[in-house]
Amino acid sequence: MAKEFRFALTDEEQGFLRDLVRLSIASRLNPASEPGEPPEPPSPTLRERLGAFVTLKLGGSLRGCIGNVRGTGELYRTVWDMARSAAFEDPRFPPLTPGEFEAVEYEISVLGPIESCPDSALVEVGRHGLIMSRDGRSGLLLPQVPVEWGWDRETFLAQTCVKAGLPRDAWREPATTILWFEAVIF
């Protein structure tokens, strides 16, 4: 069983990352008026190498969601980059417009270590995020997704397979790899 992901951000650190999302998107919408690089973080915690996702919503509906699963860069830079990617590079949506910018809501998910799930019966809705993969296909769902949709554990497993382009019951097959992770979401 994976260790519980223990990572805490202060209110100041969360506020900095929230502001960073808005600043990153604004600087892309109007490059002349905003900085092209993120400001320095207020603490060493935000320099840790952790994966992160930025989710954008308009009127409660998904408007973009992009992330870096593994911590390949400093957290604050990852959030800066993922904010821009979610706003302008999510292939499911056209680029965010200046008119949408004022109304967009956003959520940041900081990912803990990704590990092999030893038993699908141990997956907890609301605690674990999942990655399903097989035959070169993979799909990821963040821990908050099954909660938002009211899914039980088996539906969550099935929907992660669907996201990967696999049959709904592929999670039951030994050839399918199930990875899990926890996240700090705000």
Image (cartoon, rainbow, N blue to C red):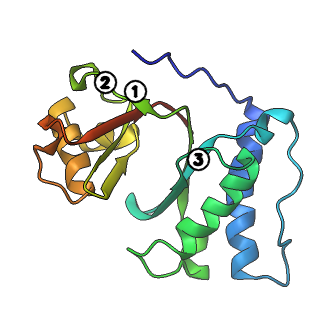
- Circle 2 SS class: loop
Is 14 or 44 nearer to us in this picture? 44
**Crowd band around label 1 with a 10 angstrom C-alpha radius: few (<14), some (14–19), many (20+):** some
Image side of residue 16 versus residue 147, left or right: right
Could you tell me the amino acid type at mark 2? Answer: Glu
Q: Are marks 1 and 3 in contact (CB under 8 Å)?
A: no
- Circle 3 SS class: strand
The residue sitting at 74% across, 54% down in the picture is: 77
**Crowd band around label 3 with a 10 angstrom C-alpha radius: few (<14), some (14–19), many (20+):** many
Q: Which mark is residue 52?
A: 3
Q: Which mark is residue 26?
A: none
C-alpha separation, residue under disc 1 versus residue under disc 3: 16 Å
The residue sitting at 56% across, 82% down in the picture is: 97
In the rendered image, which residue does mark 1 sit on? Answer: 127
Could you tell me the amino acid type at mark 1? Answer: Arg
Q: Is residue 31 above or below residue 13?
A: below
Q: Is residue 88 above or below residue 68?
A: below
Q: Earlier in the sequence, mark 1 or mark 3?
A: 3
- In the picture, the quarter occupied by the C terminus is top right
Q: Earlier in the sequence, mark 2 or mark 3?
A: 3
